[in-house]
Amino acid sequence: MSSESSRHARFNELVENYGTDLYRYAMWICGNDALAKDLVQETYLRAWKALDKLNDIGAAKSWLITILRREYARTFERKVPKFTDVETVVITEDSELEPDDRTEIELLRQSIMELAPKYREPLLLQVVLGHSCQEISEQLGISKSAVMTQLFRAREKLKSQLRKDGVTGNVHELF
Amino acid sequence: MSMNFSEFIRQLGAEPRSQDPQFLRARQSSPEFLQASADADAFEEKLNRAMSLSEPENMKKGLLEISLAPIQTVTKPGWQSMAMAAGLLVVIGAAGIGWNMNRGWDSVEEYLADHYGHDGPGLVAQAGENTNKDIGRFFSRFDVEATPELANIVSIIKFCPTPDGKGIHMVLNTSEGPVSLIYMPDTEVTDQELIVFGDMRALMVKLETGSAVIIGSESQSISTLYPLIQESIIPVLRNV
């Protein structure tokens, strides 16, 4: 295989393996479908140009997330619009859910969008991208202990909000 | 050493899928731990469902096309070189255009033939009703805004590459059918210069901030759009 076709194959692998996850992550950090698509497109554009710098394919996911986060920061370096309209989110088919469950999921989505970024982002990295606490710590440049605290608090805030909205569930307050 | 309940709850809330042996043992260690585990598992299921999003249609296809586009170090596909060599591109107007190239295009003609050739006809074909996208968001990225006269006729809008970085590619609904407009925030052009490529024509518009190019077919009077475009993309600060 020529180096050019090998390059194409590597890039295609990145798209196939991580494209959907990156879109989901982008969608949850910016809350806007069009912007999320643009962020993902820009991320892969930059990844394609810098592909030769990716030595370890095992680190590709974190590498792509780093590019996306930088691009997101760059996008909003001058202006920070606030998108919290979860109706713009393209949601998977929920029709099989009971009405009460659907309501609960909708409330949860709203609560996720309303979480402060310091809580939402580690949660996204963990739930959407499957990162471990150690990987989140490296990605965000904070200690593993801080990551664990933020993840714990993020979940407690979500549970607490659900309870406030009348949805039952056990909340374990420790902090 | 076994975990106390407080440590267990903290771990459960921070990393519920942890495979740490001590944590896994603790999950089963007493009815209290078992109940907390069951509550956490139920919550995780809801959380996962809530955070699931459908992949946009054709997103991956679009991303895969990135590797086919000629950007910087990428070798251009043969068809483009052949098209250029075949003289499909005709330039009207001898004056040079001030381009500070940094994206791999050596001239405005090459950029238009390349970028528009890649994206333009497909977008024009998709043009329909006016878009419901937040047009202001696209323009605010470059510290400019579109007046309602322009915003109200945009059918398709997306970010795109330009010779000097990012810009905006639009398709406008006009009385003569869909016309393409590319906003290039960091590119200088010779005002009202006309470039013909293939059966398309492109009219340069010098703006207060950056430039724009109106692209239409030979049968469309793109020059009639010139005053509208020149007046419709304005710096945000002008209105402050």
Image (cartoon, rainbow, N blue to C red):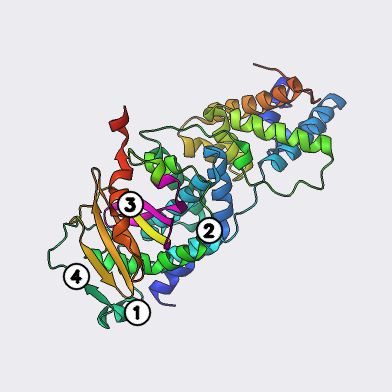
User: Mark 2, mark 3: which one is toward the viewer?
Assistant: 2
Which residue corresponds to mark 3?
Answer: B183
Does the rendering let one see residue A71? no
Look at label 3 and name its amino acid.
Tyr
Residue B140's x, y, as percent? 38, 39
Magenta highlight range: B150-177
Which residue corresponds to mark 1?
Answer: B78
Residue A11's x, y, as percent? 47, 63
Which residue corresponds to mark 4?
Answer: B92
For the C terminus of chain A, give its image quadrant.
Answer: top right
Look at label 1 and name its amino acid.
Gly
Residue A120, quarter of the rendered image: top right
Alpha carbon of mark 2 to alpha carbon of mark 1: how far? 33 Å
User: Which residue corresponds to the image point at 23% horizontal and 43% vertical from the top-left?
Assistant: B208
**What label does residue B128 carry, if any?**
2
Q: Is residue B59 shown above or below A146? A: below
